[in-house]
Image: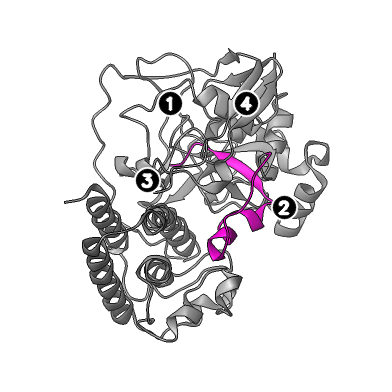
Amino acid sequence: MDGLVRRYLEVRRQTEQLCQPLSAEDCQVQSMPDASPAKWHLAHTSWFFETFVVGGEPMAASFGYLFNSYYEALGPRHERAARGVLSRPSLDEIRDYRRRVDDAMLARFERGLDDGARARAVLGLAHEEQHQELILTDVKHLFGANPTAPVYRQQQPQRPSAPGRDTARDALAWLAQPDGVVEIGVAAPGPAGEPFAFDNESPRHQALLRPYALASRLVTCGEYRAFIQDGGYRRPELWLSDGWAEVAAGRLEAPLYWRQAGSVQPGTEQVFTLDGQRPLADDEPVVHVSYYEADAYAHWAGARLPTEAEWEAAAARVPRRPHDNLLESESLHPRPAGRDGAEGLAQLYGDAWEWTSSAYSPYPGFAPAPGALGEYNGKFMCNQQVLRGGSCATPGAHIRPSYRNFFPPGARWQWSGIRLARDA
């Protein structure tokens, strides 16, 4: 079996498995405009393969309107904020559509793909992996808004520790990083789209780094509690103007999903997770904070957030590790930074997306692809911040040092956390 065919089947199966704990009602509801129902994700990822790889006469005339996300070149589409009203087609019909698309894709593979079609298939797999993470973030937001605090799955047994891992937790340390001219980004992928990178990761180019240091691990819940107890959400001098406006408008006083936040008695706070509500653990990374919250905390701590060039230059020297807490770990929650026997930066890959101080903008020489697929990334290069590193819900095959995620600075429903930086 061709490696791409095997990977296609694995990715499609993983999406179905992520939706397996959900009822039809769970798959229907949209909890906020930025989230989408799981049913829509199932249909949209299939529509992507049908539209950009299979081609030909559409399998269902209305699906191009219902499940096109933002490709203006392909015509009008259903309003994003109203995806939850799409009670029809039913979940069963969507799953039948997925099966038909899979059959058509397998037939397409059997006939053979030219380089262009193969590159689009590879992109489609990366696209579906993005939606796997979105399914989990959107379901968590949906369940977190439910007063009964539903459980996505029964809590998983504790996985064995990695070899040589100690139960003691790392104290935060500052690790100096090399300065000077570095190269970041990737060269354009080959004509068949492999090795894969999104267009926003290209072209490879030079960046100048001044002397700097990165924190050895992510900021923890216990450290963030100290910020709250010191009046962090009541001190405008710590906040960007837009962030302070959001604090006031949303009456923010803690990260998303914290309950009884800011209590003076450690251990009384609760946090909502996909495994249900449970006591907040001081040594776990804080997550579900916005860029504004991350920036305010950094100011309070006498530090700053790293630039994306600083982050990538450091990450390029750190290999992926078997115990990195990505989707395959099945924890679906960030883990404390343990002494894993490896020196240097911990938690670079997985656990939490790390906000950077870099605005999401094109790299020097960037040019979007021609046609509808050119809308994939380039048109969002405004009013967004770059995040790096992946989270506990990111598929492992999806992440690499050059990967650029991006969200509006006020977004909190992703597993987004904080790594500090400072000038050396």
Q: Marks 2 and 3, Cα distance to the nearest angstrom?
A: 26 Å
Look at 45% across and 42% down and name the residue there.
391
Q: Which residue is mark 2?
A: 383
Q: Which residue is mark 3?
A: 395
Instruction: Identify which amino acid the numbered label 3 is placed on.
Output: Pro
Q: Residues within 10 Å of mark 2 (few under 14, many from 20)?
A: few
* CB contact under 8 Å: marks 1 and 2: no
The answer to whether residue 228 of the structure is visible from this angle is no
Q: Earlier in the sequence, mark 3 or mark 1?
A: 1
Whole-percent x and y of residue 26? 38, 71
Q: Earlier in the sequence, mark 2 or mark 3?
A: 2
Q: Marks 3 and 1, Cα distance to the nearest angstrom?
A: 20 Å
Q: Marks 4 and 2, Cα distance to the nearest angstrom?
A: 21 Å
Q: From this view, report whether residue 69 is shown above or below residue 267.
A: below
Q: How is the image coloured?
A: one colour
Q: Residues within 10 Å of mark 1 (few under 14, many from 20)?
A: many
* CB contact under 8 Å: marks 4 and 2: no
Q: Marks 1 and 2, Cα distance to the nearest angstrom?
A: 32 Å
Let me know if residue 365 is in the magenta part.
yes
Q: Which residue is mark 4?
A: 310
* CB contact under 8 Å: marks 3 and 4: no
Q: Nearer the viewer, mark 3 or mark 1?
A: 3
Which numbered tag is attached to residue 367? none
Q: Closest to the observer: 157 or 234? A: 157
Q: Is residue 359 left or right of residue 10?
A: right
Whole-percent x and y of residue 337? 43, 26
Q: Is residue 1 left or right of residue 227?
A: left
Q: Which residues are magenta?
A: 364-391
Instruction: Identify which amino acid the numbered label 4 is placed on.
Output: Glu
Whole-percent x and y of residue 254? 62, 46
Q: Earlier in the sequence, mark 1 or mark 4?
A: 4
